[in-house]
Structure formats: C-alpha cells, structure tokens
Image (cartoon, helix red, strand yellow):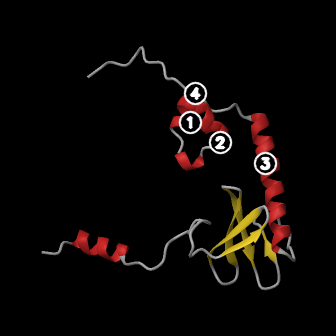
Amino acid sequence: MISPFSLQAAQLDESPEKILLPPTDPNAEIQEIPPYKLVYVNGACPRTYRVYKGDSMIGVIFQYITHWSNGVDSLRYAEPVDAVVGLDQFMKVARVSTTATEQPLTEEELLDKQFDSLTNDEWERLKRYVPKTKDLVAA
C-alpha cells in the first residue's frame, strides 16, 4: 500500500533542482571576482546572486539588463565588482556600528543561535566554554 507520505517523499527525492546551491556545488553557476564569489540564485531580470567572501555570505546583488545593484543603496553600478564592493563596504560599516552599540552575546545565548550563523570568534568562545554544572542532576 502506498501512503501519501511515501508519495511525497518520492516526489521530493526525484526533484532535479536543488534550491540555493552552495558555492562548492559543481552544478552551481558561479562568477568569481576575487576575493568574492557570486552564486546565481534565480530570476531573469533581475538575476539574483548570493555574494560570498571566503566562506561567509555577505548579501545579494541583482543583475538587470542595463546595470547591477546591491539592494543596500540606490546606486546603479556598471560592473558586478562595483556592486559587490559597495555591498561589502556597507556590511563592514553596519557591522562596526552594531558592534559599537551592542554587548556581545553570552555563551548561553550563543548556544541558542543556529550553527550556520555563528562566526569563527563565536565558535572559538563556545569551544572554551564550560557550563556551570552545579544545578545538573543525574537521571
């Protein structure tokens, strides 16, 4: 007997398209502009690209027929590298301004974050973190 769940699972397994391919996937459409990688997501006009710097995604940019944009300012760029650099600079300024006003998360708060969103510094803090165990009881 075929259940609705097995049909759904079979349909999902046979899907030829992957959603949001990572830059390491051999099927991903990638443009390299060192030190950045642009990974095509979807769209015809505008085409949407995720922008990676190293292993971290810093944002998205859009390719129109006549120009590029990065979604964080209202500028139109002639070349993708200009849109990417504008995005990167904006993210650096945004990071500096939020870092200056916010207190760092505690290790307990870091444990509640999604693993993919942790920075290298946060991972290092968690590696060294030893929770206080005086309230734990063996079951």
Q: Earlier in the sequence, mark 1 or mark 3?
A: 3
Measuring 57% from the left and 32% from the top, which residue is drawn there? 126
Quarter in which the C terminus is drawn: top left
Q: Image height check: is 2 above or below 45?
A: above
Q: Image height check: is 56 above or below 45?
A: above
Q: Label 2's element? A: helix
Residue located beneath label 2 in the image? 120
Label 1 is placed on what type of residue?
Leu
Q: Position of residue 51 (x, y in %)?
A: 71, 64
Q: Label 1's element? A: helix
Indicate the quadrant where residue 129 lies. Answer: top right
Point out which mark residue 94 bears: 3
Q: Earlier in the sequence, mark 2 or mark 3?
A: 3
Label 2 is placed on what type of residue?
Asn
Q: Label 4's element? A: helix
Image depth: mark 4 or mark 3 in front: 4
Residue located beneath label 4 in the image? 128
Residue located beneath label 1 in the image? 110
Q: Earlier in the sequence, mark 2 or mark 4?
A: 2
